[in-house]
Amino acid sequence: MSKPKNSSPKKSSQVQVLKGKLDISRSGMGYVIVEGQDKDIMVRPNDFGKAFHGDIVRVQVAKDAGSRRAEGKVIDVAERKQSEFIGNVQVNKNIAFFIASGEKPVPDFFIPVEKLMGAVDGDRVVAKLVKWDKNDKKPQGEVISLIKASDEADMAMKEVLIDAGFPLSFEPEVLLEAEKLSGKISREETSKRKDCRDILTFTIDPVDAKDFDDAISIRNLDNGNYEIGVHIADVSHFVTPNSILDKSAYARATSVYLPDRVNPMLPERISNELCSLRPNEDKYTFSVIFQITNRAEIKHKWIGRTIIHSNHRFTYEEVQQTIEQKDGLHYKPILLLNTLAQEFRKERFKNGAINFSSQEVKFQLDETGKPIGVVIKESKEAHKLVEEFMLLANRTVAEYISKIKINKEPIPFPYRIHATPDDEKLKPFAAFAKKFGYTFDIHDEKQVAASFNKLLTDVQGKPEQHVLEQLGIRTMAKAVYTSTNIGHYGLGFENYCHFTSPIRRYPDVIVHRVLQQCLEKNLSIDKKMEEKCKHCSDKERAAMEAERAGNKYKQVEFMKQFLGEEFDGIISGVSAFGFWVETVAHKCEGLVSVKDLNEFDDFRLDEADYALVGVRTARKFRMGDKIRIKLVAANLTKRQLDYEWVMEGMKAGGGKKKGKK
């Protein structure tokens, strides 16, 4: 019997289209990583279409690849990771091309000669992808800046930003829109806000800060309580949904802080002028105002738009000095705020928050940006004062939003969530901690938090402090943005969001907008909220990676002067190919290769003990061990330091040969 004409299989049933991130290896082969799929989809170089490394793409793949690795073909670019690249131009009469540098292959760009910005053959430049039309063999670009050969470090920082997908500058139309904004305080706008200008208000920020997005106000009330306000720059007043400014801010999603520069989310006109809560200026803010007793009991909360006038701009160092000396400008309110903050902190830890504290390493730079020293910054009472009031405001806003429903459903909102530790990571950590005599109760979430806090207290000042703190942090899940509220495990909060830094974080801008809708009872459902949350989480991760790369470059740049010298270090990580060591003096990390160690013994990785162990001698290099090392190589291009183990009782470079470098 003949088959009906329409019974033959349709093409659509033979293939499926999936969305994922294109990762191109150094060899040139591509792999599309699809969320929720165990295996990546292989894409051959000829099948990349118009996609670059890191792009979110749609890939067409055969539905049934059998036991073979699925192969696919890129059919569309859903989202570009980056549009700016660093490389060199080739100019020959009226034809110019841009050849990108870097480990990942990028097609050459055709550059119209009128778009060269004065670049000549061989010049190092930043070029921007302008278009890649369907029928074009090559993408078309334009030069947006020339890089001087003398600016090696500047070029490296720019490469870090570009590789992470952050544009180096704002589009002219974005800057133009920012310049058009008025900073005038209008009577009409003021009438819609709570006026807090006559209340003592001040900012507390790092000494080099230019954008002040939070301020604290305080006054005594007739009933004996205190009114304390947390006031946040009202960025959403100036950056309106779907405007050019908004689209630009969303694309970046975060400011990036490198050792020698800030790559801002918003143009300086907004971040450093209009929205920055500078002293002696009236500013629009979004505020959470509390009535608090002297026993740190919160009696009343108010959320809404305000107008403030900052009376003073404090640095953390000034406030710390006031706390320690119990004297100075506005010392009484500062001491009161500090006392309340300490009470809030105590209460947080009692309720299950985990007391992880980490040192921040910052470079001292000369006027050219060259590192000349290292400063270890520790979180002191002044930092904790600000931190506690910001946490309180963030939590209060999230609690308020969590109670609001539309059609019995939670309103879409960017919560900041932190999942409980993964058992697979927690169990080996607990076993490792036990070797040092610390017991861990992993039966439930509260006991895990209590065990962590006991460990972090008991380990203070002990040789194993550094390793257990670092490994403890690594067992933790990463905090992310999502519209599914599961609470914040590390902070011990059922509801939490980011409300306090809208100048540098886009999720805070979204929070302000949703909050205002709720206050006005004019709710709308944002069906793309989860997509926005994922984008912001991805950009936050990219920024963190860029910041790490920037710090690594400065470490190498700083340590170059010490080539051949010996240092005391602590083993900070272990793998099958070697171990990492962080110098005690400078906190600069480098690798001791197992190839060099194998001159002494055959070393194998013991994963359970976080150690490399010699097969013949049983010599052990364990994470957290103190060790003597010698700096043998500092590669700026790879942002890599190479160390060599200095055997006890033997001077580096003397006696038995210790390396082949």
Image (cartoon, helix red, strand yellow):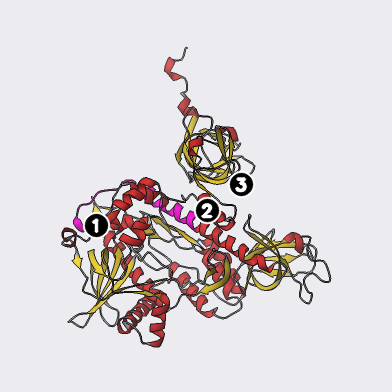
Q: Is residue 136 above or below residue 121?
A: above
Q: CA distance from mark 1 to mark 2?
A: 37 Å
**Mark 3 or mark 1, which is nearer to you?**
3
The residue lying furthest to the top in this view is 1
- The residue beneath circle 2 is 158
Q: Amino acid at mark 1?
A: Gln
Under tag 1, what secondary structure? helix
Q: Amino acid at mark 2?
A: Lys
What is the quadrant of the C terminus in the image? bottom right
- The residue beneath circle 1 is 516
- The residue beneath circle 3 is 103
Image coordinates for residue 221, horizontal then vertical, percent: 20, 80
Q: Quadrant of the rendered structure where residue 644 is? A: bottom right
- Crowding around mark 1 (Cα neighbors within 10 Å: few <14, some 14 to 19, many 20+) is some
**Mark 1 or mark 2, which is nearer to you?**
2
Q: Nearer the viewer, residue 148 or 565?
A: 148
Q: Is residue 401 above or below residue 566?
A: above
Q: Amino acid at mark 3?
A: Glu
Image coordinates for residue 82, horizontal then vertical, percent: 48, 45
Under tag 3, what secondary structure? loop
Q: Which residues are magenta?
A: 517-543
Give the main secondary structure of the magenta stretch. helix
Q: Nearer the viewer, residue 151 or 138?
A: 151
**Mark 2 or mark 3, which is nearer to you?**
2
Image coordinates for residue 32, horizontal then vertical, percent: 53, 41
Q: Quadrant of the rendered structure where residue 344 is? A: bottom left
